[in-house]
Amino acid sequence: MAYFYFIWKFHRGFLIFSAVVISAFQFLILKLVTTIDYSAITSYLLEQLPENVQAMFGKDFISMLTVEGAAAFGLNHPLVLVILSIGAITIPSRHIAGEAETGTLELVLSFPVARTKLLLNLWISVLSFLFFIILFAVSSSLVSIYIFHQLTAGLFVKMITIGCNLWLLFVFVMSLSLLLSSFGKEGNKVGIRVAGITLVFYLLHYLSSLWDTISFTKPFNFFAYYQPEDLMTGNRSFSLHFVVLFSLILICLLVSLFQFNRRDIPG
């Protein structure tokens, strides 16, 4: 717990900022959504446009006009993904590769603490921080729906499911950052690499929905296993998303533990 509190104290400003900004963003999106259903009219108007223009708008534009669509879109907004990515990437890289670079990690490991325990404590700490940020975001969405719209049991369950899926996605990003940190020697370089990988996969996921030539890459893209709009409409299986993301998380964690226990400190 001492290590958990150390990590919290070091990053609490950013973590509190993340929880407040994302929660406020979710609340405002659902407050601004009108209760009048314009989706049918807008869909008809978009169908009259050329296909390439329709692709520029995308299905997210239509979904924003309904409460369910706005709730799903809010948890998939680039602002939300960027803020969560920063936390998921910077904390592990700062406390493994970054501290190996400065020599602090060598000092920490001079105490009677197993490397496995240290790495697991860091992983569980960041996992918990991500959980509470997303919990605040989902709770804010539910409160906004309850106040300004109508919160049903079905919508409640779907929001919890989407929140769990979002949490798994960024636990994987965090685990990937931990994996590269267990090999890396410099925190900044590791952070940039993980951020670059995440950005490339996100852009590839977006382009694959517009460009049929690269649509075959979808099953190999971890962003394909977080589709809140499809989960909201029942067109996707959360079980499949859970199995794939959990497997990737487990692989990253096991390789991180193996490499961290065998590497020389300092790297």
Image (spheres, rainbow, N blue to C red):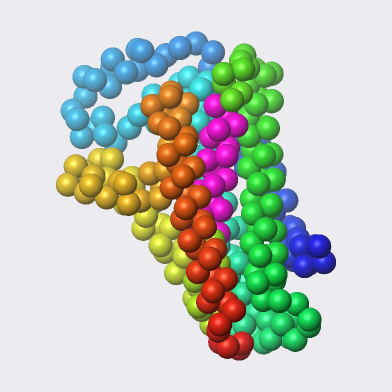
Tell me which corner region of the image, top left, top right, bottom left or bottom right, holds residue 59.
top left
Is 165 inside the magenta-drawn segment? yes
Q: Which of 82 and 259 is in front in this view?
A: 259
Assign the magenta stretch its main secondary structure. Answer: helix
Tell me which corner region of the image, top left, top right, bottom left or bottom right, holds residue 114.
bottom right
Tell me which corner region of the image, top left, top right, bottom left or bottom right, holds residue 46.
top left
Name the residue: 65% across, 26% down. 142
Q: Is residue 128 above or below residue 67?
A: below
Residue range of the region highlighted in magenta in the rendering: 158-174
Name the residue: 57% across, 77% down. 260
Q: Quadrant of the N terminus?
A: bottom right
Q: Can residue 163 be seen in this view?
A: yes
Q: Position of residue 169 (x, y in %)?
A: 51, 48
Q: Position of residue 152 (x, y in %)?
A: 61, 15
Name the residue: 23% across, 47% down. 216
Q: Nearer the viewer, residue 146 or 25?
A: 146
Q: Where is residue 267 in the image (x, y as percent from the top left)?
A: 56, 87
Q: In this view, does 242 lie above or below 35?
A: below
Is 42 inside the magenta-drawn segment? no
Q: Position of residue 23 (x, y in %)?
A: 66, 38
Q: How many labels does the image show?
A: 0
Q: In this view, does 171 lie to the left or right of 64?
A: right
Q: In this view, does 128 lie above or below 147?
A: below
Q: Residue furthest right?
A: 2
Q: Is residue 250 left or right of residue 147?
A: left
Q: Is residue 30 visible?
A: no
Name the residue: 32% across, 18% down. 43
